[in-house]
Image (cartoon, rainbow, N blue to C red):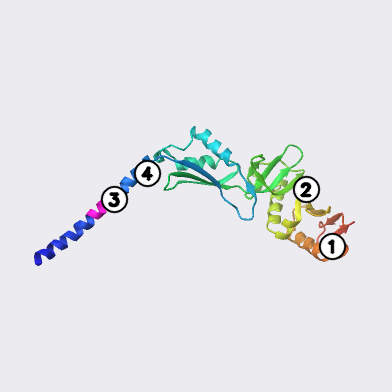
Amino acid sequence: MKGNKHIRSWLKPALGLSALVVLILLILTAVGRRKNSQIREMAIAVAEVKGEQATMDVESIRRLLQKSFGFGFAGKKVEELDIHRIEAVLEQDPFVADAEVWVDARYVLHVLLHPRIPILRIMDGKGQDYYLDAEGNRMPKSPKFWARTLVATGDIPPYVPDFKERSAYALKDLYLLSLDILADPYLLGLTEQIHLENGEFVLYPKIGRQQILLGKYEHIPSKFDRLKRFYRDVLPYRGFRYKTIDLRYRGQVVGKK
């Protein structure tokens, strides 16, 4: 009996070690098999962004990868893939904010694209026609990318990468004004277009033909508050006969028919 106990006490660690060795071998075998396995296909998807409308051309992304790597990915071994490089190439596209790439258990190469979300389209009538995204990055106009945004027109200075850091630059004020409108559901639902002329802003509503004279980019919360009170308390009783709603004078709203 003592001998059997001694054998059992020795056998348990040995069996445990054997099981561990077998497990390691299975893992190594699976890893080796995965590395030598071939990609069956590539699946490209665009992540949905709640509350935003933007579309991307998936086929142009496929062509970008083909051009950058010189081959399609179907049939390539998993070990030959440089996932980080694929993501880096995708994130160089001006319409892509972030890219996630991975291979699933069925050896499908997945590409998930997170699109940049434009907030403003610049159309100055002098050749400038592009988007700004929420971070102030420039996005080129493309027939393969569509988004519904505010539109800006007028005397808009050229885009420069450091425009947000400049102390006095009208494009900076325009960008900040766009963010202010986006942050206010009422103003966002009201505003169709922002026009810049002589350093002052004019808003055009989606409904009606009024010009909302906002003036310079200053005291914006007060101006927005006065505008909302005017639409709520005055227009329902006097109608939409006003051609201009002037907010440039502190504490006042001047409506002209």
Residue under numbered circle 4: 34
Q: Earlier in the sequence, mark 4 or mark 3?
A: 3
Q: Is residue 246 left or right of residue 33?
A: right
Q: Which residue is mark 2?
A: 195
- From the image, state whether disc 2 or disc 1 is nearer to you: 1
- Which amino acid type is marked by label 2? His
Disc 4 element: helix
Q: Residues within 10 Å of mark 1 (few under 14, many from 20)?
A: few
Distance of label 4 from label 1 (alpha carbons):
68 Å
> How far apart in space, not on screen, are marks 2 and 4 (Cα)?
58 Å
| N-terminal-most mark, 2 or 4 | 4
- Which numbered disc flags the more N-terminal residue, 4 or 1? 4
User: Does the magenta portion include 23?
Assistant: yes
- Nearer the camera: disc 2 or disc 4: 4
Residue at point 76%, 45% (across, down):
153
Secondary structure beneath dot 3 equals helix
Marks 4 & 1, CB-CB < 8 Å contact: no
Q: Badge 1 is on which residue?
A: 235
Report the mark closest to the observer, 2 or 3: 3
Q: Quadrant of the C terminus?
A: bottom right
Q: Amino acid at mark 1?
A: Leu
Q: Report crowding for label 4: few under 14, some 14 to 19, many 20 or more residues within 10 A (C-alpha).
A: some
Whether residue 238 is situated above or below residue 198 in the rendered picture? below
Q: Position of residue 128 (x, y in %)?
A: 72, 39
Residue 233 picture location, percent across and down: 82, 66
Give above or below for 41 relative to 210: above
Q: Give, as a three-letter code, the residue at label 4.
A: Arg
For the point 61% across and 55% down, which residue is it? Answer: 50
The answer to whether residue 169 shows anywhere in this view is no
What segment is highlighted magenta in the picture? Answer: 18-24
Is residue 77 something that shows in the picture? yes
Helix, strand or loop for disc 2: strand
